[in-house]
Amino acid sequence: MRPRTLWLGAVALYGLFWLWYDGFRGPLLPEEVETYMARFEARPEAEPERLAVVRNFLESDDGGEFFMLNLIRFHEGEVAVPGSDDLEPARAVLEPYTRHFVPGLLRRAGHPAFVGDAAGRYVEHWGVEPDPGWSFSGVIRYRSRRDMIELATHPGFDDAHAFKIAALSHTLAFPVAPGLVLLGPRVWVALVLALLAALGQLALAGRSRAA
């Protein structure tokens, strides 16, 4: 194998990754919006105001990625586990939801971009409700609005969503347009492939000298 083949292979692999990570299906079509909205309207938490917000978000789809900022406050103490008489800490009750949500997210090229526990209360705020005492914050990357609504309206999502409702006392989520992402997967996947190609080239060179 020649070094050139290694580098061409690395470029080809990155191209395949890029096609999967960024997608190429384009914005949601009007008929898709109606299909997903019909599914979303059947959900128990689908209030009129929320339906209007979701519809506007889907209808203004640009086909590209976005990030969802999530603020979470867990119930204090132990809460009832859906479907049983057991009581567990709220974080533990949320785990079945997370186990369902994350694999579906990863299959659709989404992933957590940032997660962390709250380190304190508001240090600056005005024009908003008082600090409820957020427990946790997370930023989730979605490949597209289509991927988000497919995951949110998946038939198996309702059972898992009951654990989220049981665990959280407050939650806030809103989408954010992509900005400057310094070290996202586009960068580190390229670096890993370049490193592997370089190591392969060094190994080939060492083998040639030994021969």
Image (cartoon, grey):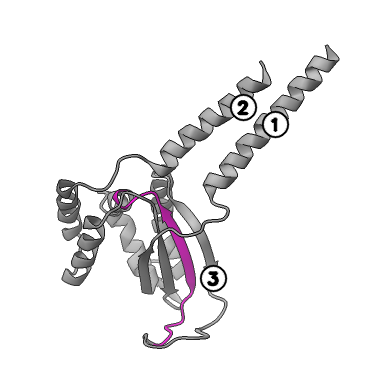
Q: Is 28 placed above or below 14 here?
A: below
Q: Residue at x 62, y 27 (%)?
A: 7
Residue under numbered circle 1: 198
Query: Label 1 vs label 3: CA separation?
Result: 39 Å
Q: Relative to the observer, which residue lies in front, 59 or 131?
A: 59
Depth check, mark 1 against mark 3: the one in front is: 1
Q: Residue furthest top?
A: 211
**Res 209 → quadrant:** top right
Where on the picture, by quarter, is residue 177? bottom left
Pick whichever, 163 or 40, lies toward us. Answer: 40
Q: Confirm or deny contact between disc 3 and disc 2 (CB under 8 A).
A: no
- Which residue is tagged 3? 117
Say which quadrant the C terminus sits in.
top right
Disc 2 element: helix
Give the residue type at disc 3. Asp
In magenta, the rendered stretch is 130-146
**x, y percent for residue 33:** 19, 52
Q: Position of residue 59 (x, y in %)?
A: 21, 56
Which mark, residue 7?
A: 2
Q: Is residue 157 above or below residue 173?
A: above
From this view, report whether residue 107 is shown above or below residue 166: above
Q: Tell whether 89 sits left or right of 30.
A: right
Examine the structure image and report whether residue 143 is included in the region drawn in magenta. yes
Q: Amino acid at mark 1?
A: Ala
